[in-house]
Amino acid sequence: MNIHEYQAKELLQKFGVATTRGKVASSPEEAEQIAREIAPAEIVVKAQIHAGGRGKGTFANGFKGGVHLCKTPEEAREIAGKMLGQTLVTHQTGAAGRVVNKVLVAQSAQIAREVYFAILLDRATAAPLIVASTEGGVEIEAVAAKSPEKIIRESIHPLAGLQPFQTR
């Protein structure tokens, strides 16, 4: 199952994990309205596709980057207009890219440090696999190539679930 970032944020919020305020938009006008509702000093508009590398990607129309910081609701509308309905090509999509049908409009956050955490399906064992790194974030592929020992992989037994000893 693939979920978008905005869906992951909704799940985290449902279980009490604090996230930045934000909503998904399907049109430039909706992006502007959400930015007005949130009203922080800085807004982030993020293309929602099932692929990593969005921030460094390039749209087929020549627009650079699927993640942009905006100072005003009008700028959020303009950026969303350049993303929505366009094909975003990243290192994970291949040359065909993926069409952006939605953007996440959210409060910008000051990033003190980035970590990487994912729960994936390990096809070899047909079981969930936790992959995590304190060195991660958007550069996880570089960490994997240069320092694979900094990435933790923990298999989860499909019947027993995640055990306390695995989280230490």
Image (spheres, rainbow, N blue to C red):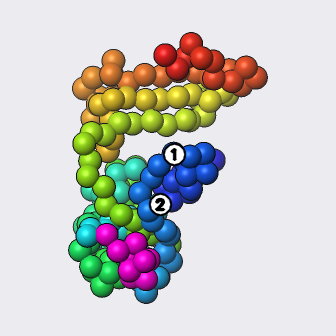
Q: Is residue 151 above or below residue 85?
A: above
Disc 1/disc 2 C-alpha distance (Å): 23 Å
Q: According to the image, label 1 marks what residue?
A: 17
Label 2 sits on a secondary structure element that is loop
The image shows residue 165, relative to residue 26, as above or below, that is: above
Res 60 → quadrant = bottom left
Dot placed on the residue nearer the N-terminal end, 1 or 2:
1
Q: Do callouts 1 and 2 mark residues in contact (Cβ within 8 Å)? A: no
- Residue 106 visible in rendering: yes
Residue beneath disc 2: 49
The residue positioned 45% from the left and 36% from the top of the image is 117
Q: Residue furthest top?
A: 165
The relative height of residue 121 versus residue 40 in the rendered view (above or below) is above
Q: Position of residue 156 (x, y in %)?
A: 62, 23
What residue do we see at 33% from left, 29% from top? 134
Q: What residue span does the magenta drawing correspond to?
A: 31-40
**Residue at x 26%, y 68% (from the top left corner):** 42
Total numbered badges shown on the rendered structure: 2
Q: Quadrant of residue 34?
A: bottom left
The residue lying toward the viewer, choosing from 119 and 63, is 119
